[in-house]
Image: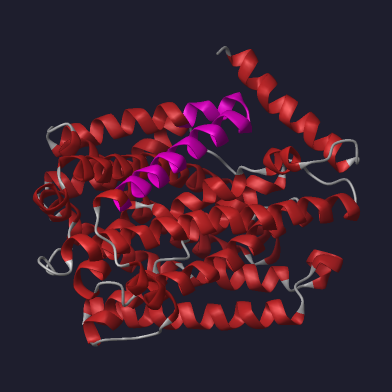
Amino acid sequence: MSITARQTLSQRTDDEIRQVLAGKRHGARSFFLFCGPAIIASIAYMDPGNFATNIEAGSSYGYALLWVVFVANVMAMLFQALSAKLGIVTGRNLAEMCHDQFSTPTRIAMWIVSEIASMATDLAEFLGGAIGLSLLFDMPLLAGMAVTAIVTYGILLVQGRGFRPLELIIGGLVAVIALCYVAEMFFASVSWKDVALGMVTPTMPDSKALAISVGIIGATIMPHALYLHSGLTQHRASGQNDNERAKILRYSNIECIVALTLAGAVNIAMVVMAAAAFHSGHPEVAEIQTAYHTLTPVLGGAAATFFLISLMASGISSSTVGTMAGQMIMQGFVGFNIPIWLRRLITMVPAFIVVIMGVNSTDALVYSQVVLSFALPIPMISLVIFTRSRVIMGSFANSSLTNLFAVIATALIIGLNVVLLYQTLG
């Protein structure tokens, strides 16, 4: 497809959205015109870091910690919806609002911390995609990293051809991840009764289970996803008045629920697969490489291959989205961009250093999550402050109930991140 055709695809989508807002188009297809931002943001909840945590939860405790995944996903829906709303209502993304509302020293400090978090995020995602490629095609890890870098850079170049082609590519990778885990369910002998009980019965078997639960919840809300989602909605189908903004917001909320429900289902499937495959005979499985090598004799080569394909799709898509978020963070906080190839190079250098130095890739993933724990409060607290303000949001300011849930969730996640840091470092 030519560049002109791709541009036409985005323009046609935008024109059809305007028809929906004007009341000239109706029906289920109208919803799909608004789909894209939440699907892209949902990649953050299916990144390689989730793979490692969910595998350990399922292999060590079976279905007992499924309720933690469920609760984490509900909180994710709330904050991604708030991020989308900020962009839709104000036409400004979260980083730009921080630039507008905070003092220069504060926003520069926030930018530095957010950039470090963006690099830490990409370290985990880039390594995950490289691990998947290297295991799937039996190539050295460095070669897998090089291929991952080339593929993600190619996808990033699509940004210049309009918003719709990129949304379709990322949506396709999300579908690959989801379909792989649907296939996994056919290979695993799942106790669906225990799955149902694990979803609704809060239990905490021991202190290790608490540590894993903290990892699941503490890493659920990703800083870059909150920045990115507000930016993806700020210019795409912008409302001309409050009525149009309210209609866009309704579609956005539905998309958040659908996309994050899918992401939550994938995370639940990861735990279920690990519980069915490893809990009885291999409860020690905690690393991605170990999970792959153990899956082959337990569930067969096909199951192991689906696992690697999903990991590869996860790493490539989440690394692409992480680089996009980094560009948005820099532009919003300090007002300038760097070429996309340079951004891609900067964010992947730490991963190459880790591998060249011989650092264990799983350890690198753990330490990257520690860095994210430091950065997470910044976008969360800022988002709550902005979306509850009637000066900023007008009639779209959060209701008292939404504010209550947001404050409780913020306090809970920050508290759990403190526990995660204490347990990781202590």
The verdict on residue 157 being magenta is yes
Residue 306 percent location from the top left of the image = 27, 42
Residue range corresponding to the magenta coloring = 156-185
Relative image position of residue 272 (x, y in whole percent): 31, 63
Query: In the figure, is residue 288 to the left or right of 322?
Result: left
Instruction: Locate residue 86: give its quadrant.
Output: bottom right
Q: Is residue 57 above or below residue 332?
A: below
Determine if residue 95 is in view. no
Looking at the figure, which quarter contains the C terminus?
Answer: bottom left
Near-viewer residue (311 or 344):
311
Residue 53 visible at all = yes
Q: How is the image coloured?
A: secondary structure
- The prevailing secondary structure element of the residues shown in magenta is helix
Q: Quadrant of the N terminus?
A: top right
Q: Nearer the viewer, residue 194 or 372?
A: 194
Q: Give the x, y percent position of residue 43.
A: 46, 49
Q: Is residue 161 above or below residue 326?
A: above
